[in-house]
Image (spheres, rainbow, N blue to C red):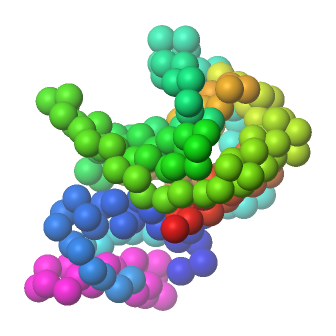
Amino acid sequence: MKNLRAITPSSYIIAACALTGILSFSAVTSQAGQMKFLPSGNSTATAQVESVDNQDLLAAVPIPSSELPPALEKNTVFRAIANGGFFGQTVETRLLNNGQVIQQYIRINGNSTPTEIARISRQDVKGFEEFLNKDVDFGQFDQLSYPAPIGAADYISVTLSSNAGTTRYADIGSNQLPEALQQVIQNWETIVSSK
């Protein structure tokens, strides 16, 4: 269970379960590393938890300019775009300067409804901006991608953007990212889960 957060953030597991109609579930891990989500209904969804070597950092490669997302909107402080995985969904989550955390599923037909999933204080927004700009220098990761380890499958590609830059990583290798980027991801997950 301890590797689950590093490999597959809980917000993605919850999103995947919601997409399949599983509204409540419990997670159980066998000794073989098989994670089972036991829904309140009769079906069972499963996900294989991969073991990843923590000793080697992933090598960064440049993100081609054609793959960069649009610039942040004026009122957006930070954005995460997650796509891929078993369901192939795209989810955009944004932190606005007023403290709202807005999430929307990007649908093929273009229909999507933004939903507020969390809210933090304006002071916490400023603290997060300061953390990004001064504590970890998020700009050092601008236009760098940390691809999935060779042989990885069904991973989620996450693109993070702030005013300082954009970076991308594969969730399955998140424990092999530079420490500063891991801190950004951890703080972002804390913000997204704030109520």
Residue toward you, 13 or 48: 13
Q: State the image coordinates of residue 114 (x, y, percent, origin top left).
A: 33, 43
The extreme left residue here reads 42
Residue toward you, 129 or 14: 129
Left or right: 91 as drawn, with respect to 120: left
**Residue 128 in the image: above or below residue 4:** above
**Residue 18 in the image: above or below residue 149:** below
Count of labels in the image: 0
Answer whether residue 90 is magenta in the image: no
**Residue 79 in the image: above or below residue 20:** above
Left or right: 174 as drawn, with respect to 8: right
Q: State the image coordinates of residue 11 (x, y, percent, origin top left).
A: 45, 62
**Residue drawn at x 34%, y 60% as measured from the top left:** 15
Q: State the image coordinates of residue 123 (x, y, percent, origin top left).
A: 74, 52
**Residue drawn at x 47%, y 78% as measured from the top left:** 33
Query: Can see residue 138?
Result: yes
Q: Looking at the rendering, which quadrant does residue 175 occupy?
A: bottom right
The extreme right residue here reads 134
Residue toward you, 97 or 21: 97
Q: Which residues are magenta?
A: 28-44
Answer whether residue 36 is magenta in the image: yes
